Image (cartoon, rainbow, N blue to C red):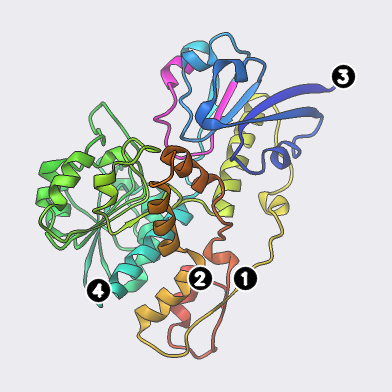
Amino acid sequence: MSRRCITVLADDNMPGVEACCAQITGVDFTVLRRSGRSLVAADVAEADWLFVRSITPVNAALLTGSRVRFVGTATIGTDHIDLAWLARQGIAWASAPGCNARAVGEWVLAMVVRLAVEQDESLTGKTLGIVGLGHVGRWVATLLAPLGLRLLAFDPLLMADNWPAEPAVCQVDWPTLLAESDIVTIHTPLIRAGSCPTFHLFDADALAQLKPSAWLLNAARGAVIDHAALVQDLQGQERVVALDVWEGEPALRPDVLSRVRYGSPHIAGHSLEGKWRGTWQIAEAAAMADGMALTGRLADILPANALPVLDLPATGKPLARLHAVLQQVLDQDGDDARLRAAQHASAPESAFDALRKHYPVRREFPAQHLRMMGDDPQRQLFIALGFSC
């Protein structure tokens, strides 16, 4: 009996495609790599499966005339894919919900702690407003709850019976979240139409309803914030803003970048585990669509990188000690500096993509070993965050 042959065209920045496909027995795979930003119809013409990320628009212009029968995006959002057109063509598809949710939650935790230490403020008793309580929003709640924050969330798409019991998150309406939050963090998909659109959800009116002292973080989609309105909002006040995503990226507005406290090139979810998890999820869905299955476990094929040992300062304020550990996992100062330098390059859009493509290997908290005394008063906090202590 002849073996099946499948050609997979994958974004050249997507790890583990070959290793994941190798978990499907009885099939000969050819994996081709192309730049996701510049993918054209000729590239996909002979592909059976197409694996992309959020930077590749997948629509009739790309796929008409191809033999693609499955599209997988190793992302949570699907705003870059014309799902209605795929349905009309009978092309199966899958995304990877939750693949990098923990990684984004860790980025938010590190940024909130960083800002608190910089401004010498306590987080205990402050109100954190989470916009969108899906996979990422729930990880944000889980990771920040141990810091003594009051947690609010706004998510009109989440039914009341699906609201998480733990950690304790209070569901509120939109005006209440804006008015009462000391910190607002965004974790919604980008939705342009329908009953609950998120495109420019943070417009001039919404920004005006925030406390002047509120911190605003976005690690979802750039266009959830109206960048023109944000520039106006930041004139004449010291609001603290940290953006990992940008309206119009990879093209960034210099007037926005110059006004935010921290910026990074859409890498909040760029953990090794998150990237491989996304690839595994869409490879698994592709196999299922073709009547096959993956064998083994993702853990068995993850790269065997040497895991670092983290050090905890022996003394200091609790938040400062936590910040010192988180800095060893996420180099947010370096991300910001590299992003600002890239905007002065001769081709800033290419430089933005290069920062993402060559982002240093980052491991999630459970892969990290923290060296600390057994009776350290913060031991339980670090265990709750997932560290091995």
Mark sitting earlier along the chain (1/4): 4
For the residues marked 2 and 4, what is the alpha-carbon distance in whole angstroms?
20 Å
The reply to whether residue 282 is in sight is yes
For the residues marked 1 and 4, what is the alpha-carbon distance in whole angstroms?
29 Å
Measuring from the top left, give residue 167's x and y in whole percent. Answer: 35, 63
Q: To which quarter of the image does residue 251 belong?
A: top left
Q: Which mark is residue 328?
A: 2
Measuring from the top left, give residue 183's x and y in whole percent. Answer: 23, 61
The N terminus lies in quadrant: top right
Left or right: 47 with respect to 349?
Answer: right
The reply to whether residue 68 is in sight is no
Three-letter amino acid code at disc 3?
Answer: Ser
Q: Is mark 3 on a helix, strand or loop?
A: loop
According to the image, label 1 marks what residue? 308
Residue 277 drawn in magenta? no
Q: Which mark is residue 119?
A: 4
For the residues marked 3 and 1, what is the alpha-carbon distance in whole angstroms?
46 Å
78 or 312, which is in the foreground? 312
Three-letter amino acid code at disc 4?
Answer: Gln
Mark sitting earlier along the chain (3/1): 3
Q: Residue at x 24, y 34 (%)?
A: 196
**Disc 2 to disc 4: CB gap under 8 Å:** no
Magenta stretch in the rendered image: 70-86
